[in-house]
Image: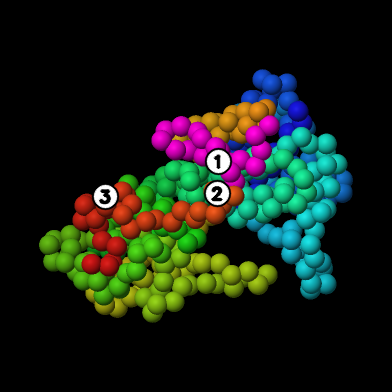
Amino acid sequence: MRLGVLTSGGDCAGLNAVIRAVVRRADTYGFQVVGIHKGTHGLLTRPVEAVPITSADVSGLVGRGGTVLETTNKGDPFAYPDGNGGLIDRSADIGNGYHELGLDALIGIGGDGSLAILDRLARRGGWNLVGIPKTIDNDVGHTETAIGFASAVAVATEALDRLDVTAASHSRVMVLEVMGRDAGHVALHAGIAGGAHVILIPEIEYDIDTVCSYLERRRSRGHNHSLVVCAEAIKEPAGDRRLNTLAQGERRYGGVGERIAEAIAMRTGAETRVTVLGHVQRGGSPVAADRVLASAFGVAAVDLCAEHRFGRMVAWQHRRVIDLPIEDAIGSYQAVELDDTMVTTARGLGITFGDT
């Protein structure tokens, strides 16, 4: 078989470990692997931006961050900019790129949005697809974890560890803003692991006065500092979500940490400081858990190709790799649930979500 592999959507730690696993497993079958550059954009160019990848090419990649194939999270192929201010459907061009490469199947590594687009392209273009979930948000349905999540949590946890000692040194309230789009998994897990006192996530509506009352109670009990971790998509104290418009017209979350810190300072008189991790959570070397998960997913994806079981996504459930229809996975968004074990754990530790 001749397999294509691409990374799509935002980068994260562990992508290169997947590419390595795909190539090495394919080698045991005698399959050829072609790496496609810049996600689906590589399939749009002529000639197609792709190169053969061998086991020798992936040596040493398991611990390298980012993606050697590059990626993109811009340009919907079904509504692609035509250069004149309009949009055109270029899905057929991508399908032609797949067929020009002579591929028997494509392994796509992406989040829910990327996998949805790839699944639609495969169905329309008549080609075979196997999906691998990656996202620091951990919001892809039917998988307990996705590539990149553990590393993002580790970075945020280390940030909290570092902020804790400087907060104690200066009697401050430190606010850490983390990524997570519309899901609060990173904030929740890092908040527990990093000893945060307040965790604010999109799924649980908070009241800023409740947060401040909690912080004042801590201070009255002799605690001279506090840690607050908030997801970028929570509402501002005024009730709106913080969206910034970029130069290209794209709108992204960011800046809510500043508003939270300002509100705390005004209501409590506490000295506050803000740290916004941003893309630091997506870069750097993957932690061991992501390297292992990436390896297991890469091997399983190639095995599905060998079995001609296409239209499937690999996932992690009950300590093992399973597979399911891609449409089932992307049709089930995995936000933090109110009865999530980690929510119960945080409350049991005395952490507040600002709701009680």
- Distance between the Cα atoms at labels 3 and 2? 29 Å
Rendered position, 85 above or below 78: below
Question: Magenta residues: mostly which secondary structure?
Answer: strand
- Distance between the Cα atoms at labels 2 and 1? 7 Å
In the rendering, which numbered label is found on residue 324? 1
Q: Which residue is located at x 51 percent, y 67 percent?
A: 253
Circle 3 sits on which residue?
A: 345
Q: Nearer the viewer, residue 154 or 302?
A: 302
Viewport quadrant of the N terminus:
top right
The magenta segment = 308-326
Q: Nearer the viewer, mark 3 or mark 1?
A: 1
Q: Amino acid at mark 2?
A: Asp
- Distance between the Cα atoms at labels 3 and 1? 30 Å
Residue 277 makes an appearance in the image: no
Circle 2 sits on which residue?
A: 328
Decide: few, some or many residues near mark 1? Use Cα within 10 Å; few <14, some 14-19, many ≥20.
Answer: some
Protein image colouring = rainbow
Q: Is residue 10 left or right of residue 174?
A: right
Do the numbered discs 2 and 1 sit on residues whose CB atoms are within 8 Å? yes
